[in-house]
Amino acid sequence: MHIRLINPNTTTAMTQLIGRSASRVAGEGVTVDAVNPSMGPASIESHYEEALAVPGLLEQIALGNADGVDGFAIACFGDPGLDAARELSDGPVLGIAEAAFHAASMVGRRFSVMTTLSRTRGRAQELMDRYGFAHQCAGIHACDIPVLELETLGEDGIYAIAKACREAIERDDSDAVVLGCAGMADFCPQISQVVGVPVIDGVVAATGMLQGLIRMGVTTSRRGEYAAPPVKAMTGALAQFEIR
């Protein structure tokens, strides 16, 4: 079994962190790797950057299909390009926010979310509504640490995030916390010690769920909306994305 995590931004250090985190839950006979696109933003913290990240993400889906990858995870908490990736992929595709919300709902009645910048909270709420977890999410909070600063965060910074998580849990009266950025994947052990409730990282959650889907022999439905995109011409910078 081969699972590939796609970091939709172009920061290699974050991609390596994502790969290490996912590998910790790889079962016997499972290969897990992480890649990032050849084009796109260094991090995704706005709608503009999210939109520009999608072509590079789809590039990696196509390359993964050619490599015989069995399933993909989109390792950005905004789940950018998820629907398009499902149309294109030969195997199942999960977003890390989608996977994290499902996991959190299974270990507690209500959960809180701790994301990076305050401006991304609206996107998290939009996904919460789409996936049907609005009634179980007790609050969406931000630590206001930019994504690219997470990779150089020291122990004091990690503790500050953990303290913010604990305060959110107490304020929300929730039973679990979801970390709202793939760049936080390494922080689960430290944060767990501080908060005392399940801490859900979407990278690990998506990796585990993909293994289950693949073993079940289940992939994305090809009926209706997720059928293969129609064949049509693409021009200019997007010519390489033409479906033939």
Image: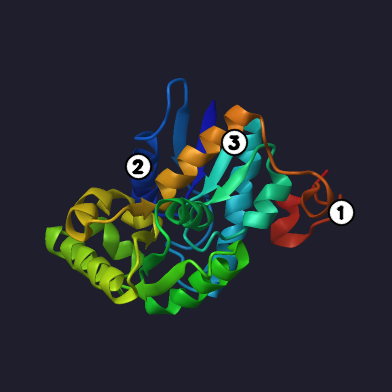
Question: Label for residue 21?
Answer: 2
Q: Which mark is residue 118?
A: none
Q: Which residue is mark 3?
A: 213
Rendered position, 103 above or below 128: above
| N-term-proximal mark, 1 vs 2 | 2
Seen from the viewer's position, the closer of residues 186 and 63 is 186
Instruction: Give the residue at the far left of this rendering.
Output: 156
Q: CA distance from mark 1 to mark 2?
A: 39 Å
Residue behind mark 1: 232
Query: How far across and down, in percent of the image, does residue 182 sit?
Result: 40, 55
Q: Residue at x 42, y 48 (%)?
A: 203
* Quarter of the figure with residue 212: top right
Question: Tag 2, which secondary structure?
Answer: helix
Secondary structure at badge 1 equals loop
- Residue 68 seen in render: no
Up the image or down, 178 lies above or below 87; here it is below
Give how far across and how far down residue 157 sits, in percent.
18, 65
Q: Quadrant of the C terminus?
A: top right
- The earlier-in-sequence mark between 3 and 1 is 3
Please, is residue 161 above or below residue 75 in the view?
below
Give the amino acid type for the residue marked by disc 2 in the picture. Ser
Q: Nearer the viewer, residue 162 or 31?
A: 162
